[in-house]
Amino acid sequence: MPATKIKAANSSPTKLSWDTWAVLAAFLAALLIRIGVVKHVPW
Amino acid sequence: MSETFAIPQASPAHEVQVQQAQPGLQFLRVLPGIILLAAIGYAGKLLELNVGKYAKAHHWIFPNIEYVLWAILLGLAISNTVGIPAIFRAGVATYEFWLKVGIVLLGARFLLGDVLKLGSVSLALVAIEITGAIAFMTLLGRLFHLKPKLTTLLAVGSAVCGVSAIIATQGAIDADEEDSSFAIAAILALGALALFTFPLIGHALHLSDHAYGLWAGLAVDNTAEASAAGALYSDAAGKLAVLAKTTRNAMIGFVVLGYAIYWGSQGQAKSVKNKAAFLWQKFPKFVLGFLLISVLATYGFFNKDQIGALGNLSRWAFLLTFAGVGLRTNFREMRKQGLRPFAVGAIGEVVIAVFTLVLVIAAQKFAGW
């Protein structure tokens, strides 16, 4: 097997996938911006 | 669904199990790699700002290279020279996580009407692309006498969404890890080539941002490379590429289900008992997140400044992703995978790229973009 594999094994169906964690993280960030905790994000 | 992040490396493979039961330990394990992604991404941004200025001050003729390309080039340089030290690998593998965070946040920059309008155009093109790509890759696999399941993996990878689709299909049809590894290497190698060839072709053909973005989203297989190929052309093209690719990603469950039923009927995979549960399990949840943020932005949940902040946060997430795209691409390792799967993948990708380009140009004339 040539690739380094990092397995986030979800042995239990109740555990959240990385996909879902990404959505939750994005919504948390959106909420923090919406309620004014984060006022400005520079670029 | 178990998720696997693959980083091709020069050294023999290791399997690192990230235990979800120990979030503190997991965070410490990924932190160095995330810092590396951020450092490379930020270095790309600094290079974009300063190299042009420096060249201008010294009266040199130097093309304006955007941060996207700098971040990818820096990552490629590290991966293909010194390699990625073990301490960084788990964190570097999170680039797919940042990609999905970036896509969800990008939803704030799309009004729902635009998503539905562009999404419906994309959906029609995606349906044609998926059907054509699967049929052509299956035919090629037979012509080159590849193993049937390897052909299935290559067909799914090139028709739907690259590495994620291959991993989802591998589990569903009980394919060998080795076949999956071949298919992933072929898709990643061709994605890396697309990063450099697509913008050149787009500029040579004077494609609009709209047409180019759709083309990149339809033809480049892996979501990270499709987003990067779009962003390398322009910001607007990057947005369109993400939208088209997200539409393609939404189809993953249906295609994997079709193959699971087929291989199950051949007695070479477990049969699917609950099709609705299977579809939900395979459906990429970030597509729903993207749509929900777009709905919230459309109905005024965020003000203009907040939408700007969400857009910038999305750019930062993509910056980490682009650094990861470069870091996980190791040409030496890809060469070891063998020529035949790569040849099938390469022929298929060229045909799919030409086919989708014709589709997009025809749709452009039809829709009058």
Image: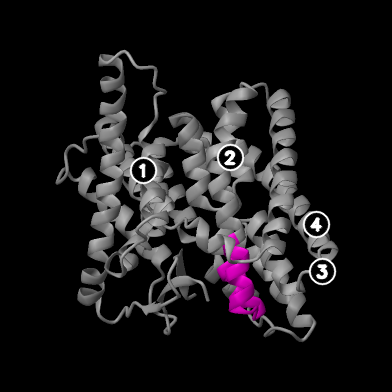
* Residue designated by label 4: B135
How many numbered circles are shown? 4
Which residue is at a point 39% across and 21% down the rendered structure image? B62
Q: Is residue A41 above or below residue B157?
A: above
Q: Is residue B180 magenta?
A: yes
> Is any atom of residue B161 visible in this view?
no
> Type of residue at label 3?
His
* Residue designated by label 2: B216
Mark with earlier residue (1, 3) = 1
Disc 1 + disc 3, Cβ < 8 Å: no
For disc 1, the neighbor class at 10 Å (few under 14, some 14 to 19, many from 20) is many
Residue closest to the eye, B337 or B349? B337
Mark with earlier residue (4, 3) = 4
Q: Say what secondary structure mark 1 lies in.
A: helix
Q: Nearer the viewer, mark 2 or mark 3?
A: 3
Residue closest to the eye, B366 or B94? B94
* Residue designated by label 3: B145
* Residue designated by label 1: B71
> Is any atom of residue B75 visible in this view?
yes
> Type of residue at label 1?
Ala
4 and 3 marks on the same chain: yes
Q: Where does the C terminus of chain B fall, quadrant-wise?
A: top right
Distance between the alpha carbons at the discs numbered 2 and 4:
20 Å
